Amino acid sequence: MGTRRIRSLGLVILGAMGGVLLSLGISALAQRGEPLPLKELQQFANVFAAIKASYVEPVTDKQLINDAIKGLFTDLDPHSVYLDADAFKEMEAITQGGFGGLGIEIGSEDGMPKVIAPIEDTPAARAGILSGDLITQINGKPTKGMSLNDAIKLMRGEPKTSITLTIKRAGRDKPLTFKIIRDLIKVRSVRSKMLPGDIAFIRIAQFQEHTTSDMVKQLRALSEKKTPKALVLDLRNDPGGLLDSAIGVASAFLPPGSLVVSTKGRIPSSNREYFAKQVDFSRGAPVGESDLADKLPRWTKTVPMVVLVNIGSASASEIVAGALQDHKRAKVIGNRTFGKGSVQSVLPLSEDTGIKLTTARYYTPSGKSIQVTGVTPDIVVDDTAQGNLFRLPREVDLAHHLVNGASTDSADTESETAPNKDAKMFEFGGSDDFQLSQAVNFLDGKPVKQRDPVVAAAKSGKAVAGEKGNRQAAGKAEKKNETERKPVNPEATKVEHYRVTPSGVIKVN
């Protein structure tokens, strides 16, 4: 990818995607006005020469330089990294929504990748991969102890190439083997449907270039027959993406001019504020979609609204959830989010390499940083009726993570429960989606449960006599939020301003 292509992206990339793509002339030393550390550079040159001349096996200059650059990031935060040619190319593919692979959303369980959901009409779905499948081997290589990123890299590849997955499936005594042909996966970032009771459901799986325009189209389609009386925005297991898209999504529900997110760093260019604007709806949209802002249904600004989040909601997702929460535009329901509140800038080094460097923290409209702490839901609801399901590490669990800066390096977990081994995988937006059913209950003015103690007790084999204690534990967070379980009053949910920082990105919306 050439330098012109790099600069043409001009996008702030959050979460799993990358960071802020800025056209910065890299001259850190010149910016600081500090002299070059000549003594240390001479020492580096001496070590380089010694390895080059005397190491037991020959090492190329390119390999030594690349390894040295990677070493500079060793003790930095986990989101700062050197992007070699492959990593740079992959970043571009992800942000544009296409890559060679199988088409599955995966999480981690017991140190192995677990299928959260196969994406419809992809090689994985057609081969028969199901939600809840545990991937024990990839091309014969055991996945136990393998990082999620390494597993993803093994499963991605050029279209038309084959891969063999060994699967452990609940209810099957023997492992299952699937030989799958990779294909070009165009991730569908936005899905929608109308729920019973005229409640609109929008799920965003990733913030990509056309996420905002796709969402506007689907919001309009949902209201063609009847105006929805409420809306659920599902950001669960959404790792983030482009800042522009996050601001665009927030803008759909906030008045123009509302603060979505702000960023603060060491250099002046890192200190910025991002506001909701109608122009964001047409940014990056294909020809013919520049009038999407005018096509946005008016009800999106005032309809009662719930945002669903969980441990897998990160970066851009946290910006949107945080902004909507701060402006009291929506109630946030689910579990505390990942806690990625830092901004990364992608700086080109050559035509096909660069560095992703953390340059700022982002802040919600109220000025709060969610770095490490994440977004705390207004109402805590477990992943399933049996209890929590997902076992993903949070930002606080990552080595060398940035501290919050405004609070202690920890998060309140009093209202959270540990994952339940009996909890079953479910489809986001499906009939067995417990958190969604509780969101609907809230919008209908019905009681909201953190979990179902009867189901949980039955699943774990506990006597019904112990149900009372389970109900008390499950109801602890509910009592705390009793006054918040009434239908949202549209007049009381007027949007205010929000702020954002990407490291991902700090809360926006």
Image (cartoon, rainbow, N blue to C red):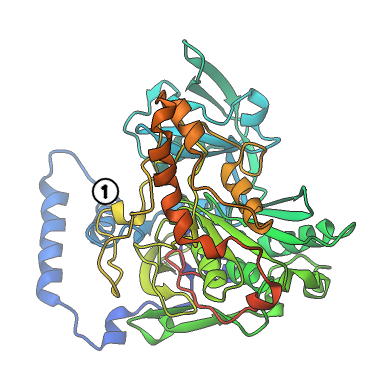
- The image quadrant where one finds the C terminus is bottom right
- Residue 460's image quarter? top left
At x 48% / y 45%, what residue is drawn? Answer: 382
Q: Give the residue at the far right of this rendering.
A: 225
Residue 62: % across, % down: 30, 53
Element carrying mark 1? loop
The residue lying toward the viewer, choosing from 267 and 491, is: 491
Residue 267: % across, % down: 35, 84
The residue lying toward the viewer, choosing from 372 and 65, is: 372
Residue flagged by tag 1: what amino acid is it?
Thr
At x 27% / y 81%, what residue is drawn? Answer: 29
- The image quadrant where one finds the N terminus is bottom right
Q: What crowding class fits label 1: few (fewer than 14 Cα within 10 Å), some (14-19), or many (20 or more)?
A: few
Residue 319: % across, % down: 51, 67
What residue is shown with label 1? 60
At x 25% / y 54%, what residue is drawn? Answer: 399
Residue 122 in view in this figure: yes
> On the rendered structure, is 301 left or right of 78?
right
The residue lying toward the viewer, choosing from 40 and 248, is: 248
Residue 11 in view in this figure: no
